[in-house]
């Protein structure tokens, strides 16, 4: 017989595949309820579950070997609970036969089932994307529990240990801590399958069918048979319901042939399999046993290379044929079949499945089975990272994007590949392998962040559309005299309806350009030029801001720098924002003198009147980095400004004047700021101007600076800090200390002395440190002051003294990092200690881990790899403050020193290549 025509690769119409599988599961439950087996055993187990529900703890587990009837029992019990109406029910079958055993499928089902009854941590219209996000959200929701006064929620996870590509440890993360009003029931084959959930879980064992019940079942189904047949069925089946049912079906089809075979058959599933399946079908059954879900007949035989002559033999009790395709009727059959395979035979079958997926992908004929299960088969054969990277490609995204559950399936495949790369990043020895693992993990990170960004865009669009529809309804009801809407209603997609539209334009060009520029700094000239070319390509994209072009210009050299700077100036000139004005003034430093002055003066003149006190100081600080001649030109331009604004410019600009003019300019700026004195007090703007000018003030201005301190009013502490530091630099230490003593508040005096310590001469520094450290030990806020001044103190006193104080105060991470950065001799030991602590931090402490990146050069390579792997993982899952915000590419740029330590310049170049390549096929 020729095989049936091949099914179309297009997804089936109607509910998503997972929901179709659940519907098929419930049809099977109804079938079992109509012809029950083992009613006594089931009744006893249900009674124990009912007692647990009334008086037990948070979790219960129904245990029994495969085929004992756990799924049928829990399904029927769940229906009874739902009909009683005293509990809310969330039932999820984890089943290979029904296509719900993959982790992303099961978790999506679970999230959809519990979401109506629990409060989500996400905003309206937002949903988790990917396995890890879903796990975390489920953990939060289940731990918070049900609102007071509401009906309890009973969560039933059937087939807990039948999962594919996930482990019981993964499920423990959201089932460990259940909040008020939430109970969970699991079914599994053994107590060991519960892992860490065993503690606090009430165990209900489901016994086999009694011998008399076996005889009753035979009588109801087949009528009176010889007592010996009843005895043989009971003996061979061992009272296992699925074996009893299989034997009854075999007897009903051909009792004359089945009865003699039954008499000589040993007990157990393998013997029943021989009796029911027959030898002719055995060649195909191992392939069906190793399949991870329903599979079409033609595809199964194409993989197995079993003769088409065996086609009609795949029928009978072991095999179920449904809408999705062929599957073994029960996992116990798979156990019996796989038990007969030698390890090399099982490996050969697995390899054939993996190779079939590879061939289908290469030829563009990916079936529904391959789409959903190829990754799991690659994991079974321990495929190389290069093979798994096919799952992180545009072509594989195109396979998934037409499926109803495209985003969750694709992200699950990418996440699994990222986990493989992360393991290799820590474990492999060869530098080439490290580079491959690093590039792969970065690729996965970029892909998942981009996909989430696309989905966030879609969620935002859906929310806005719902609100717009609500407004229209309210307007219509208002015109008709109605009461209006009860509130916004946003339709969220059901399980598997998050179709991924990969064509969504998202503007991330500026972040991409910035990351590439930072990575380029770690590269030799030739590779640096290539990566900067990619950065410039990104900065020139339509969605990129002028600031991205300005950053690219600053990274270039020679005439290219000037050309790109002019291009950036033109784009920035069209934006007319505060950020644009600051970028233009900074950009002017890259242009010839005349162009710089024109560009900068235009930006200064553009500042609105109500923003001048805020923007002029910032613009002037940037302008101080121009050429001295251009600074002089801006100085002259400022003469048209009123004194209340001009001092904001001159006090910041003085440091950029030609050296011969700097002292006179600083004196002029200081005099202008002091001229604003009114009623013996300086306005706040003038105080900050003096703080900015003090480090550059000439020696002859010391008296004027001291006068300014007396007039600083509520801004006295920052002004005294700046002036006293300058007095110390000028050698007037006694005047500086006397100025500090005038501060009335003791905590202010300690803070100023903390900042002043690095400016004191060596002769008095040790005594000042002894006094200051004593005050810090006795006072409040010492850790903040240590963090702020750690680097300066280390350079002034040496690391040992500062480390001694830090141990007493319990120094923060930034303080220790600052000490390490300021003392290369101590950097290795400090870094080793911090890294040992870093691996124990929860993942939401990634800011502390980022603080270690500047110490990358002081790390051993294994330590650097571990930190790199951890940071890339944390970047993947850290929460974003807005649906459309995604800083992943920018963060990757900041990790450049770590990439260089882990994989050298070639590794940095590979990371840059991934950023550029991924952007070409994902927005």
Image: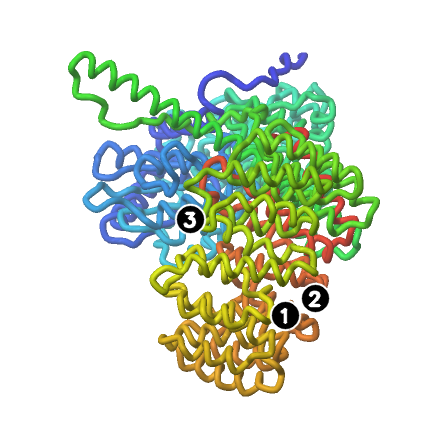
Q: Which residue is mark 3?
A: 174
* Cα distance in 3D space between marks 3 and 2: 39 Å
User: What secondary structure is found at the residue carrying circle 2?
Assistant: helix
User: What secondary structure is found at the residue carrying circle 1?
Assistant: helix
* Cα distance in 3D space between marks 3 and 1: 39 Å
Q: Considering depth in this image, is 770 or 857 the residue closer to the camera?
A: 770
Tell whether 776 sits left or right of 42: right
Please give the label number shown on residue 820: 1
Q: Which residue is mark 2?
A: 858
Quadrant where the image shows the N terminus:
top right
Query: Which residue is located at x 45 percent, y 48 percent?
Result: 613
Mark before the other along the chain sequence, 3 or 2? 3
Of circles 3 and 2, which is in front? 2
Which image quadrant for residue 39? Answer: top left
* Cα distance in 3D space between marks 2 and 1: 9 Å
Q: Considering depth in this image, is 276 or 440 the residue closer to the camera?
A: 440
Q: Does residue 340 appear in this view?
A: no
Q: Position of residue 315 (x, y in %)?
A: 56, 23
Which image quadrant for residue 748? Answer: bottom left
Of circles 2 and 1, which is in front? 1
Q: Is residue 805 above or below residue 534?
A: below
Q: Considering depth in this image, is 35 or 904 the residue closer to the camera?
A: 904
Q: Position of residue 261 (x, y in %)?
A: 56, 32
User: What secondary structure is found at the residue carrying circle 3?
Assistant: helix
* CA neighbours of label 2 inside 10 A, class few (<14), some (14 to 19), many (20+): many
Mark 3 touches mark 2? (CB < 8 Å):
no
């Amino acid at each position: 017989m020729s095989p049936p025509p091949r099914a179309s690769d297009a997804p089936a119409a109607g509910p998503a595949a997972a929901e179709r599988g659940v519907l098929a599961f419930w049809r099977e439950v109804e079938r079992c309820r109509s012809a029950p087996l083992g009613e006594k055993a089931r009744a006893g187990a249900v009674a124990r579950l009912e007692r647990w529900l009334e008086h037990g703890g948070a979790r219960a587990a129904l245990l029994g070997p495969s085929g004992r009837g756990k799924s049928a029992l829990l399904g029927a019990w769940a229906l009874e609970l739902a009909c009683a109406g005293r509990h809310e029910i969330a039932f999820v079958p984890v089943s290979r036969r029904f296509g719900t055993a993959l982790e992303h499928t099961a978790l999506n089902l679970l999230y959809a089932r519990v979401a109506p009854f629990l409060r989500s941590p996400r905003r309206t219209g937002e949903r988790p994307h990917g396995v890890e996000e879903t796990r975390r959200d489920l953990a939060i929701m289940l731990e918070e529990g049900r609102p007071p006064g509401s009906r309890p929620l009973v969560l039933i996870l059937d087939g807990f240990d039948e999962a594919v590509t996930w482990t019981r440890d993964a499920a423990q993360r959201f089932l460990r801590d259940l909040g008020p009003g939430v109970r969970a029931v699991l079914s599994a084959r053994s107590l060991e399958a519960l892992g860490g959930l065993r503690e606090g879980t009430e165990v209900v064992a489901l016994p086999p069918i009694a011998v008399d019940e076996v005889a009753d079942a035979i009588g109801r189904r087949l009528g009176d048979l010889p007592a010996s047949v009843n005895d043989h069925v009971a003996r061979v089946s061992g009272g296992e319901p699925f074996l009893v049912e299989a034997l009854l079906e075999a007897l009903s089809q051909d009792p004359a042939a089945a009865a003699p075979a039954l008499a000589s058959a040993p007990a157990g599933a393998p013997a029943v399999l021989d009796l029911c399946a027959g030898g002719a079908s055995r060649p195909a059954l191992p392939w069906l046993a190793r399949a991870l879900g329903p599979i079409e007949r033609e595809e199964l035989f194409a993989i197995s290379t079993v003769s088409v002559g065996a086609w009609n033999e795949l029928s009978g009790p072991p095999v179920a044929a449904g809408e999705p395709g062929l599957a073994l009727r029960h996992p116990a059959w798979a156990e019996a079949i796989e038990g007969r395979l030698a390890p090399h035979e099982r490996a050969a079958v697995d390899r054939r499945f993996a190779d079939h997926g590879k061939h289908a992908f290469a030829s563009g004929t990916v079936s529904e089975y391959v789409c959903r299960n190829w990754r799991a088969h690659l994991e079974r054969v321990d495929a190389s990272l290069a093979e798994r990277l096919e799952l992180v490609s545009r072509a594989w995204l195109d396979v998934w994007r037409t499926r109803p559950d495209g985003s969750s399936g694709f992200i699950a495949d990418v996440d699994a590949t990222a986990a493989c790369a992360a393991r290799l990043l820590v474990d492999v020895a060869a530098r080439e392998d490290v580079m491959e693992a690093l590039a792969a993990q970065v690729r996965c990170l970029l892909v998942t962040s981009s996909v989430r960004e696309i989905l966030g865009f879609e969620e935002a669009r859906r929310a806005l559309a719902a609100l717009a529809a609500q407004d229209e309804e309210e307007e219509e009801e208002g015109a008709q005299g109605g009461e209006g809407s009860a509130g916004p209603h946003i339709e969220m997609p059901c399980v598997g309806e998050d179709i991924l539209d990969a064509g969504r334009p998202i503007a991330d060009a500026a972040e991409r350009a910035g990351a590439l520029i930072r990575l380029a700094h770690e590269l030799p000239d030739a590779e640096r030029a290539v990566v900067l070319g990619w950065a410039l390509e990104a900065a020139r994209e339509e969605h990129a801001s002028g600031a991205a072009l300005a950053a690219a210009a600053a990274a270039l050299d020679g005439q290219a720098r000037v050309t790109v700077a002019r291009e950036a100036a033109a784009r920035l000139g069209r934006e007319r924002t505060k950020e644009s004005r600051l970028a233009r003034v900074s950009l002017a430093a890259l242009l010839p003198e005349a162009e710089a002055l024109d560009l900068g003066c235009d930006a200064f003149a553009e500042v609105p009147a109500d923003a001048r006190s805020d923007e002029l100081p910032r613009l002037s600080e940037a302008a101080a980095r121009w050429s001295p001649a251009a600074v002089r030109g801006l100085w002259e331009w400022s003469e048209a400004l009123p004194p209340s604004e001009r001092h904001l410019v001159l006090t910041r600009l003085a440091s950029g004047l030609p050296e011969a003019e700097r002292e006179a300019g600083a004196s002029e700026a200081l005099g202008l700021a002091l001229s604003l004195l009114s009623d013996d007090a300086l306005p706040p703007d003038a105080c900050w101007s003096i703080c900015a000018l003090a480090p550059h003030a000439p020696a002859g201005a010391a008296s004027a600076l001291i006068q300014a301190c007396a007039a600083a009013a509520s801004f006295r502490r920052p002004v005294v800090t700046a002036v006293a530091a300058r007095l110390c630099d000028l050698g007037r230490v006694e005047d500086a200390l006397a100025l500090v003593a005038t501060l009335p508040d003791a905590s202010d005096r300690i803070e100023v002395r903390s900042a002043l310590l690095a400016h004191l001469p060596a002769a008095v520094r040790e005594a000042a440190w002894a006094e200051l450290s004593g005050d810090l030990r006795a006072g409040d806020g010492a850790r903040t002051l240590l963090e702020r001044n750690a680097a300066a103190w280390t350079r002034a006193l040496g690391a040992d003294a500062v480390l001694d104080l830090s141990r007493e105060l319990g120094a923060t991470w930034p303080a220790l990092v600052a000490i390490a950065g300021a003392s290369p001799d101590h950097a290795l030991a400090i870094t080793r200690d911090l890294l040992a602590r870093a691996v124990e931090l929860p993942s939401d402490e990634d800011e502390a881990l980022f603080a270690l990146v500047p110490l990358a050069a002081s790390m051993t390579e294994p330590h650097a790899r571990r930190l790199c792997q951890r940071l890339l993982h944390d970047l993947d899952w850290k929460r974003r403050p807005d649906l459309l915000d995604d800083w992943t590419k920018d963060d990757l740029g900041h990790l450049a020193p770590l990439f260089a330590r882990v994989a050298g310049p070639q590794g940095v170049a590979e990371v840059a290549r991934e950023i550029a390549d991924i952007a070409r096929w994902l927005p």
